[in-house]
Amino acid sequence: MACIKGVPHPFPYQGSKRQLASYILSCMPDGINVLYEPFAGSAAITIAAAYKNKARRYVINDLHTPIANLWNEIINNPERLCKKYESLWNAQKKQGRSYYDFIRTCFNEKGSSHHFLYLLARCVKGTVRYNRNGEFNNSPDNRRLGMKPENMRNNLANISAILKGRVTVCCNDYKEILAKSRKGDLIYMDPPYQGVCNVRNHRYCQSVDFDEFCEQLFLLNRKKIDFIVSYDGRTGNKVHGKELPSDLNLQRIELKVGRSAQATLLGRTDYTYESLYVSKSIADKRSILPSNYLEAEELPLFCGLP
């Protein structure tokens, strides 16, 4: 699938919905009061929605404190953050792999946002992983040096211009964020897939219980609050997570997002599909595409910034 063109992004992040942003935005109703993203990560949907003025205000939330702190820096101090990132990026060329390990140790000791940004730009698959002691432990991708400082500066400056004065950054449990929503708001949720929490090399610091999550969706339905969920998926015949219950009355759309890199390495041609669930309150307002497979080339590209 072609990458969405023109929209600035702050850092590589596994599971980011940049490629699907245009389709997700097309499912959103008009006149949103507040757009909440309780599992923000790279906040790809918030960035795209803010550029398109889909909502009056935005809330970025992530229980992972370094992500929330990084977003505050990106929005409010992009130039200061870029200068520190540039210093780290330039220093790495003289010291090689040992420098990445040094910065990783600095981050684990201090939790500084510029250290975290550098690690996200360099680490394998843009994946946040921690060991049993709660220390960031992902390795660097030695094929690349990370985003060049001039590109990082442009991206962060554009993101700050889009979001500053319009967004609130939080670091709360997702249920607290959902409880703040009201009719006229919209919630986009991309919780971690089942099976990636509470395992060796933790990918997320927040585990989301399936039954508890479904109960929260029932409550949103009862309050007639619009929501969209990216949740389960599959690669070939391998299913990742259970489908959300049919009695939630959600419209499920399965999106074909590309060939599996792992399957390709094994000589197979398996494709990855992701499920998008749209609440009945939205489906009643809009004409949503039927629940079938959408080929990558059928997904509209989001033009983004000139």
Image (cartoon, grey):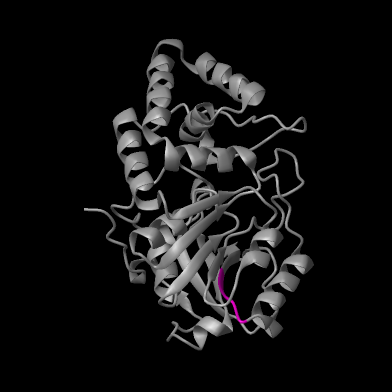
Query: Toward the viewer: 131 or 219?
Result: 219
Q: Is residue 48 above or below residue 32?
A: above
Residue 226 magenta: yes
How far across and how far down the image is residue 284, in percent?
51, 89
Q: Is residue 63 in view from this perspective? A: yes
How far across and how far down the image is residue 296, in percent?
38, 66
- Figure quadrant of residue 304: bottom left
Query: Toward the viewer: 144 or 219?
Result: 219
User: Residue furthest toward the top?
Assistant: 94
Q: Which quadrant of the rendered structure holds the N terminus?
A: bottom left
How far across and how far down the image is residue 85, in percent?
42, 26
User: Residue furthest toward the bottom?
Assistant: 284
Type of secondary structure dominating the magenta stretch: strand
- Figure quadrant of residue 277: bottom right
Look at 41% across and 69% down and name the residue there: 25
User: Residue furthest toward the front?
Assistant: 165
Residue 152 shown left or right of residue 116 in the figure: left
**Magenta residues?**
224-228
How far across and how far down the image is residue 7, in percent?
33, 52
Q: Is residue 144 in view from this perspective? A: no
Look at 50% across and 50% down and name the residue there: 267
Query: Toward the viewer: 83 or 3?
Result: 83
Look at 50% across and 41% down and name the residue there: 72
Residue 222 shown left or right of residue 87 in the figure: right
Query: Toward the viewer: 181 or 17?
Result: 181
